[in-house]
Image (tube, rainbow, N blue to C red):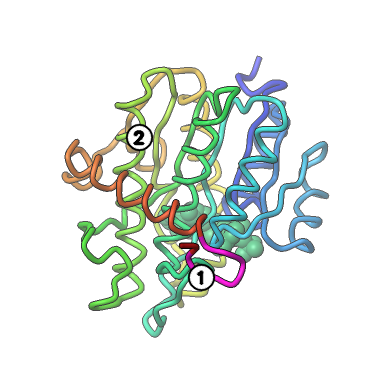
Amino acid sequence: MSPFTDQAVLVTGATDGIGLLAAERLARLGARVLLHGRDPAKLRAALARVPGSTPLIADLSDLRQVERLADAVADGPRLALLVNNAGVGSGGPSGRRETSVDGYELRWAVNFLAPFALTEGLLARAGGGPAAVVNVASLGQAPLDLDDPGLEQSYGGSLAYARSKLALVTWTLDLAARRPELGVNALHPGTYLDTRMVRDAAIAPRGTAESGADAVVEVARRTVTGEVRGVFFDRDQPSRALGEAYDPKLQERLRRVAQAEVERALQRDAGGVART
Ligand SMILES: NC(=O)c1ccc[n+]([C@@H]2O[C@H](COP(=O)([O-])OP(=O)(O)OC[C@H]3O[C@@H](n4cnc5c(N)ncnc54)[C@H](OP(=O)(O)O)[C@@H]3O)[C@@H](O)[C@H]2O)c1
């Protein structure tokens, strides 16, 4: 029997690319899939491809919507698995700096702050949050600058993407150390796979989106079965992230920076002004 049979599984960014294919596979393996998307029309199209799934809508560049997403998930059955897959790519060579609804650099916000807020928010709620978490990161990693997480001094799309992904891996390892009961791993799903993110960056794809979904599902299997935890995978092989991701002091500092950014965003009123 599949370890996903009758298990509630949430996949973020399940409206396209690797996330949609992984959601289809998890459903075929018996999971009760919660499909997350931000665009109602794309979410309807995805639902038609994943029979029996449940839709959840939230723009992950808005931390209030992330919080509402956590509330909606917490109202349902306990998650056996959360796959933090949604992400924004580098934007290509001419990509300009963009900001989230909360005013944070967009890649930092969607690729790191949103999965951080969703997962930590669920774990902090009564009911215990997910039993296992898989973070879809990347081999594209760059050292963090926590004095300038928004790259306000000097911006590059690839640098912003790579920092957001190293932050995601660093927090994955922090979670694994802090929460011994939680199955948690991160992975690089493959290099320049044929998805919209890669095509939008004007990069010639070198692999299929299907191979990325295969890697996500295999790492998910090893995570929910407790076979391995606290590991960064290169596709389905245990690998090594950039060295600083393993530094407990950096992990703690990153967690504090992220917590403060999330709290600040949630204290803003609807007009975007911080409440005093
Ligand atoms: N493709 C690769 O070669 C590769 C390599 C390394 C890592 N990855 C990682 O794999 C993951 C999946 O990427 P992909 O290649 O499958 O890209 P994709 O086809 O562009 O899919 C990205 C998904 O994220 C969602 N998303 C983006 N911004 C969002 C926001 N603000 N709120 C909610 N959802 C949002 C998209 O929603 P919409 O459908 O509404 O746009 C889509 O469902 C990402 O984390 C990416 O960084 C990919």
Helix, strand, or loop for circle 2? strand
Whether 52 is among the magenta residues is no
Decide whether the magenta segment is chiefly helix, strand or loop: loop
Identify the mark at residue 273; answer none if there is no mark.
1
Residue extending farthest top: 1
The residue located at (44%, 52%) in the rendering is: 262
Give the left or right position of residue 121, taking residue 90 as reference: right
The span shown in magenta is 268-274
Instruction: Give x and y (percent) for residue 120.
Output: 47, 37
Q: Mark 2 points at which residue?
A: 237
66, 38: nearer the viewer: 66
Disc 2/disc 1 C-alpha distance (Å): 45 Å
Q: Does the residue labelled 2 lie within 8 Å of ligand 1?
A: no
Instruction: Give x and y (percent) for residue 22.
Output: 61, 43
The residue located at (41%, 81%) in the rendering is: 95
122, 238: nearer the viewer: 122
Whether 269 is among the magenta residues is yes
Q: Which amino acid does label 1 sit on?
A: Val
Q: Residues within 10 Å of mark 2 (few under 14, many from 20)?
A: some
Residue extending farthest front: 276
Give the left or right position of residue 111, taking residue 39 as reference: left
Q: Is residue 151 visible?
A: yes
Q: What residue type is labelled 2?
A: Gln
The residue located at (28%, 37%) in the rendering is: 239
Instruction: Give x and y (percent) for residue 12.
Output: 59, 48
> Vertically, is 160 above or below 14?
below
Do callouts 2 and 1 mark residues in contact (Cβ within 8 Å)?
no
